[in-house]
Image: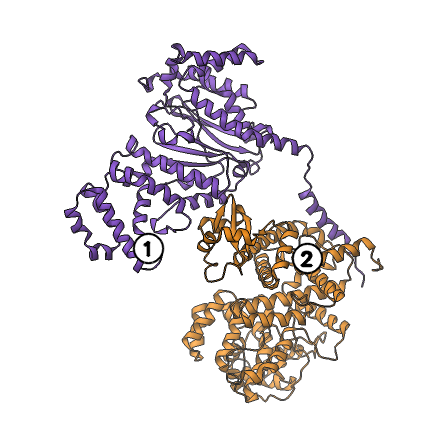
Chain colours: A purple, B orange
Amino acid sequence: MPSSDYDPACLPDLLPLYYRRLFPFAQYYRWLNYGGVQKNYFQNREFSFTLKDDIYVRYQSFSSQSELEKEMQKMNPYKIDIGAVYSHRPNQHNTVKSGSFQALEKELVFDIDMTDYDDVRSCCSAADICSKCWTLMTIAIRILDRSLRQDFGFHHLLWVYSGRRGVHCWVCDEAARKLSAAARSAVAEYLSLIKVKQFHFSFNINSLTVVERYFPQYALQDQNILGRKESEEKVLALVPEDILSIFKLQEIFQEERNPERRWRHIEAQAKKKQTTAKKWQYFEKEIMLQYCYPRLDVNVSKGVNHLLKSPFSVHPKTGRISVPIDLKDVEKFDPFAVPTISLICEELDRPKADEDEAKSEDAKEKENEQDSAEKRKIRDYKRTSLAKYVKYFDQFLAGMADSWKGKLRRQSGEFNTGDIFTNFMLDLFLCFLIFFL
Amino acid sequence: MQFSSKKPRAVTDLKAELYSQPLQFYAQPPLENISLSEFESFAVDRLKLLKTVENLGVSYVKLNDDYLKKLDNEIRTLNFPQVGVSLDAKDQTEKRRKDHISHFILRLAYCQTEDLRRWFIQQEVDLFKYRFKKLDSGEKLEFLHKNNLQYNTISAEEKDNLREKLTISSYAASGVKLEEQDFYKVPFQDALDLVRTRKVYLKEGYAYIPHNEIVTIVLNDFRTRLSKALALTARSLPAVHSDERLQPLLNHLSHSYLGQDYSVQKNVGKISLEQIDSLAGKSFPLCMRQLHQALRDQHHLRHGGRMQYGLFLKGIGLSLEQALQFWRMEFIRGKVDADKFDKAYAYSIRHMFGKEGKRADYTPYSCMKVILSNPPSQGDYHGCPFRHSDPELLKQKLQSYKVSPSGVSQILELVKGMHYQLACQKYFELTHNVEDTSFSLSHPNQYFTESQKVLGGGKDVKRETDTLQRPQESSAARGLTAAREPAVDESQHLAEITKNLETDFQDA
């Protein structure tokens, strides 16, 4: 699918169009409102905007979906970040007594950035990415998604393409939003491998399976780590000294040029060592992990008040929309096929190929009670390549909606006595001490 | 004044319910009437218990056999509830009630400063740990549930299914058979340290924790709760302080000395002046040895030094006549002539013995008093050398007194940890060639008495530890509890305590 040539200079013209006719405000609000279970959850949420000429404004907050729309259409931000839900409306934070304005809740987030892998990828570096190194993101998504669901019991994970060279994960479960900073950093540390030597066989067995699956194609073929002198040396540097010398791997490599067969030599040596040496000596697995295991920035996940790029915002340098990634198709996800703002604006004028599908969906919409402007808007994004991503987002929200309904029902019958009780008891104790000599 | 009459039935039932558990988190404050004397005696007993916990914690590896035995003893002596020992129900309830009330009283006394809070929390956590470990697994579960820690053990079936994962995941589990270990299912947010370092098996948001680790988690919970509670208590303190009966009591709980006061002279005349020099080297604690040395060197001591040393000498058995002679002889060698001595200094010595002025018979200073009040300045030699001397100078002094280098470093370690009395005890051990002091040092005169016992007894303390067991324990009991001479009855005992508090108050 061609992405229309994007020119950052056109942003000032494209953004108003995007925010007026394409940005999925209804779904966006539906997400951040979380079913209205907690009062003022949306109203106390911080947004930050980067405007034209790099003007950065923080502590933006909105009292309703329509206010959000109006403001965004007025300001036309180049970048949008989402922050925490605070104790008061962020846009009034200056009126609050210092110390009382606190960040209370936020989704648990993770940021995987391709530049963190620069020392182990040979195809690109810095901001560049290609289909060969994108596999690293696929591996990261698979491993982290599994771990967050199976180990930590989270259910509502939104994976989003960052727009250039990475992915973000938004864990939206209620339990996740309520986590303390200490808990967030503990989860992030659990998921990281700071030094490969930390590898403990038992816990990462699932992660290891994923890595093993991808390693041959990704590392041996695409990255060709054993095919070129410099990278081959880097790999051998991870092999323990004694193996290198006893089994004279370097000499074997002189003879054997084929990368797959070279790897098999390394594996064979590793197996031999395992039978003789002490436990947990799995250096060939350590090599695989060093090249493939997810590298995340703990600082992004730690802070409750950390601001992260919003889904459906535009990346000013590439023009790509930060779209959610459908986990069912994660293998096939192609960052270069993600629509740019210029493409979808263009598609607004010339309708897409499968117009029939769009027409039948229009008919369904007519049956609902909505004003024509809304209808038009919904029809608008549906004509563009953005449609499937919004659809996926809808499915994600539907999955969460069930938990909101249950909460609302339960809430009507509760009230909180906790803190009042403790204070009361203390006063009672002090009052009841009556003495006689 | 209200008389403590029959308590309403609702409260009694509540009491029975509250005290049905062997261990508690002290979440609810006690709600009943209590006499002032009970208030005081409960507080003092618990304080003694916590001080024992502190001393044992520094002298032994926590929870090893010696530690456990000694703590058991102390708990029984002080009439606190014992875990795992089935007693008469009424007795049990009484003891638990005492435990409950005394904890809350000490909260009032120890919430005020950061240091006090830290000390209190540390000892209470150690005590809690000791008690929790003594519960059997059924009682442990009951405790967890009753305190809203919804940690459940996993069934044998589940353990079987997760067998491999559990064995690999916990270092604790290896070596101990899986069947024997209880595993608890805990929400991961309550086990962050284990999660962070991947020392635990996680499944669907729950951490599967072996038994030993659960203790850590429960302890952290206890510590956090207590910390918050103390902060809350500190805020309510003004209300408590407005009651004048409580304020002095609470203030002095954190400073009071709880042992013999050495005011009643037992050995008057038994010490001759010629002996003092040799006694100073052998049986005096470091503070007094220092003072004696300074007096000999400079033929003079300032007021603080005269008070501290003079009262000590009175405590070891010097009579008034002897004391006058002693000081006079020394001062005359210096810049003071006989007349000046009689006019200026003799009066104050007689005052010390209660023969002048208001005729108050001053008691020799306890370690607490020496350490906490009247710090020495340039030219003073009083105070506690472990507390007030520069560590380098202290080191030199110890070396000059022929203490071994390893001993010196042990002492300096204790000084660094602010355990001054324990440092002095270590000094005792090293100079008397004794492995383990049987007493808990809290008074310079106690040091002297114990030293005389060791030196005069003639028994080789290091080797004959078995035969010494019983005498050790009885002297430990004597050292640790307030004067339990058979003749003393309840009211006199209390009067003594109050008198001690008052004396401290006055002399300060």
Q: Quadrant of residue A44?
A: top right
Q: Which residue is mark 2?
A: B104
Visible residue check, residue A129: no
Specify few, some or many for label 2: CA neighbours under 10 Å numbering under 14, 14-19, or 20 or more.
many
Mark 1 or 2: the one toward you: 1
Direction from residue A412 to residue A203 in the image, left or right: left
Which chain does tag 1 point to?
Answer: A
Q: Which residue is mark 1?
A: A281
Can marks 1 and 2 be said to lie on one chain? no
Direction from residue A187 to residue B322 in the image, left or right: right
Which image quadrant: the C terminus of chain B? bottom right
Which image quadrant: the N terminus of chain B? bottom right
Q: Secondary structure at mark 1?
A: loop
- Which residue is nearer to you in this view: B419 or B345? B419
Residue A175 percent coordinates (x, y): 54, 39
Residue B311 percent coordinates (x, y): 62, 77
- Which residue is nearer to you in this view: A161 or A244? A244
The answer to whether B234 is drawn above or below residue B263 in the figure is above
Visible residue check, residue A21: yes
Which chain does tag 2 point to?
Answer: B
- Which residue is nearer to you in this view: A226 or B132? A226
Q: Which amino acid type is marked by label 2?
A: Phe
Residue B22 percent coordinates (x, y): 67, 61
Q: Secondary structure at mark 2?
A: helix
Q: Which amino acid type is marked by label 1?
A: Gln
Compute the Cα span from label 1 to label 2.
54 Å
Direction from residue A91 to residue B17 in the image, left or right: right
Specify few, some or many for label 1: CA neighbours under 10 Å numbering under 14, 14-19, or 20 or more.
many
Measuring 34% from the left and 51% from the top, which residue is drawn there? A197
